[in-house]
Image (cartoon, rainbow, N blue to C red):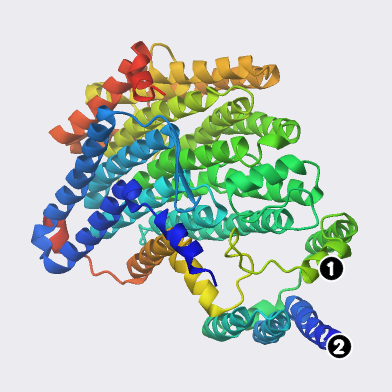
Amino acid sequence: MDVLFIIFAVLTVVPALLMVVSRNPVNGAMFMIISFVGMAALFVLLEAFLLAILQVLVYAGAIMVLFLFIIMLLDMDEVEKIKPGTVTSIASGISLALIIVGVAVLLGSDGLAGQSVAHLAAAPDFPSADNPMGLALSAKAYGFGLFTKYMLPFQLTGVLLLVSMIGVIIISKKRETSQGQEQS
Amino acid sequence: MNLEVFKQISDTNRWGLLLPEIYLVGLALILLVFEMLFRRQDLLLIVRVAIWGQVLLLGLMVLQYLEGFPTGSVTAFSGLLTQTPATEVMRLFFVAGSILVSFLATTYLRRQNLPRTEFFAITMLITVAMMVLVQSSQFVLFFVALETVTIGFYVLVAYCRQSPFSLEAGLKFLILGALSSAILLFGIVFLYGVAGNPALPGHVADSMNFADLASFIAANPTNPLVLIGTCLVLAGVAFKVGAVPFQIWIPDVYQGAPTPVTAFLAVSSKAAGVFVLLTLVRGPFASLHSFLVPLLSTVAVLTILFGNLTALPQRNVKRLMGLSGIAHAGYLLVGVVASMTVDWAVYAVVFYLITYLLASFGVFGVMIQMAGDDDSDQEVDHYEDLGQRHPFLAGVLTVGLGSLAGIPPLGGFIGKLLIFIAAFQAGLYGLLAASIIGVVISIYYYFGWIREAVFRVWRSPEGSPAQEGASTFTVSTVEIVTLGGLSALTIGIGIFPSLVDCLMRL
């Protein structure tokens, strides 16, 4: 298990890093797909199979295809020639250092200590009476959760999709100057 | 899997509590169907259905509250939704805001020749999401509602596609809004993770729930992850409110957006943000009192000073409304900070929001009438001699701006007074001083505008650019009644503040 974890963790982190530093957007998108697949494998190791499948289907599949489409439509060759300025480089270097220090400090604090993770592994909180949603592993548990407890957010998501659908039509539609509407 | 548990959970899904929201969604869908079925000539029908449908809803809600205003708090949807008297007032507030936005939009959309049905539908759906947002007491519902509001606004801001300003504003809002949502989500995930950690004392089962989270945070008030998560969540919400240092998007977006959308952003969106802040600060984060009061106080002082000082040299009225809106967000933040110690400060904030709604929509109504073909280019100079050209509009403008500046006996004065008293009782003397300095500065630029509109009798020698547009005024009766009604309410609330008080008899 540990060997697998290390392999997939490397497969997740290294392409993520390469994606950020690669100058060619298409290469970047490809690295991102590899990183997503690695993450899906990590989900499998955690026995969260549904999440793993969703990760591959939705992120590595649909969303990345959309990304690639847009990158290729936009003809991004010019972007490669732009070199980052000195100030930008220094600022990003400082931010990176801060993030690394922050994560290190957090790992040292009691918030994420190894002991608590071990505790969680020893007594995983599977669906129980007071916490049916605790660690929803199977698709069935997701379904029950979605249609009972999270019914209201689920319905509201429908409203969200409706809004975005109307919005896309309104903003992208080419309008002939409608004379009829002016008279109404 | 224990199905009984799920059955109990679904029994708490009391959809009857959300009837106004369901009605509004239905109305929006009906409008879209009408758009498909009817010819272009019948489109006036859609405008009528949209506005009168919402007025009917407001009437029904008021009638229901006349029978007896709810006094306690109701929790439903297995803890996702909590209704309190304050959220009931906010629901009325949002419906009223939606009606006024739709009303302003009819004039604007006719002039710019833009499609109307979709505008009304999106406005109503955003309103629904805001109504759910203020009632949500769990982060999943909270986030979905907030995203619905934000995505709706992305569309509305870029609604006037022909105008490069509108498109630019839409793009800026989209990028910065997505960034702020990411920050907020990051904070929520931190809190969720740490509150569900079985190794920590007082860990809870549903760590997305505000009540559970409150009990966890009370047990671990110094945990670094809790503090980081809290800061990120508050930063995400502060972005929606437009508090310093998350105010960069405001001037450009306010200027570029169509004027009714600017009004919607300035009033309803800000009100939703402030109310959510109140809920968070008094609910889950209540035990971080000693950490949050200095933090939020600093933000409030910076917000007030930044908003007022940048509004001073501003000549574009839409930017002026945006920047002075930042200052108003600052006063509201003072109320939010005070509400952590003084309970009734919640009602001071809600009262302030109501006066802000009345005054702002009055001013924006006049702005819509004054706007030329280019909506984003409205200078203070265009208002020259409005008092002679159209005394009624000048009067509405004066009442609205006076109320925003906080001049007695207008409503805005009472609103500011209540917040200041709350801050005084909470012992926030520094905040009080900053707010009073802010109010003094704000009188300068609000009255510069009033002076331009009403008192300026001499004319600059090179002639005024507003002269050509002067003859095109046609203000319909409905508009006169609405704008007059807003002004009358502003004055009425100022003289009899108990008018609102009886609404909030709690």
Please report, as a chain letter, where disc 1 is located: A
**B352 or B11, which lies in front?**
B11
Element on which disc 2 rests: helix
| Residue B411 x, y percent position in the rendering | 39, 19
- Tell me whether the residue at label 2 lies in contact with that at label 1, contact meaning CB atoms closer than 8 angstroms: no
| Residue B482 x, y percent position in the rendering | 22, 31
- Which quadrant holds the C terminus of chain B? top left
**Disc 2 target residue:** A3
In the image, A17: left or right of B312? Answer: right
- Which quadrant holds the N terminus of chain B? bottom right
Identified at 58% across, 51% down, the residue is: B209
**Three-letter residue code for mark 2:** Val
Identified at 76% across, 69% down, the residue is: A84
Residue A158 in sight from this viewpoint: yes
**Disc 1 target residue:** A118
* Tally of marks: 2
Where A78 sits versus B23, above or below? below
| Residue A43 x, y percent position in the rendering | 69, 80
Q: Quadrant of residue A158?
A: bottom left
Please report, as a chain letter, where disc 2 is located: A
Distance from Cα at disc 2 to Cα at disc 1:
18 Å
Asked whether the residues under marks 2 and 1 belong to the same chain, the reply is yes
**Mark in front: 2 vs 1:** 1
**B79 or A25, which lies in front?**
B79
**B288 or B353, which lies in front?**
B288
Residue B475 in sight from this viewpoint: no
**Three-letter residue code for mark 1:** Ala
In the image, B121: left or right of B158? Answer: left
| Residue B213 x, y percent position in the rendering | 65, 47
Identify the mark nearer the N-term, 2 or 1. 2
Q: Quadrant of residue B304?
A: top right
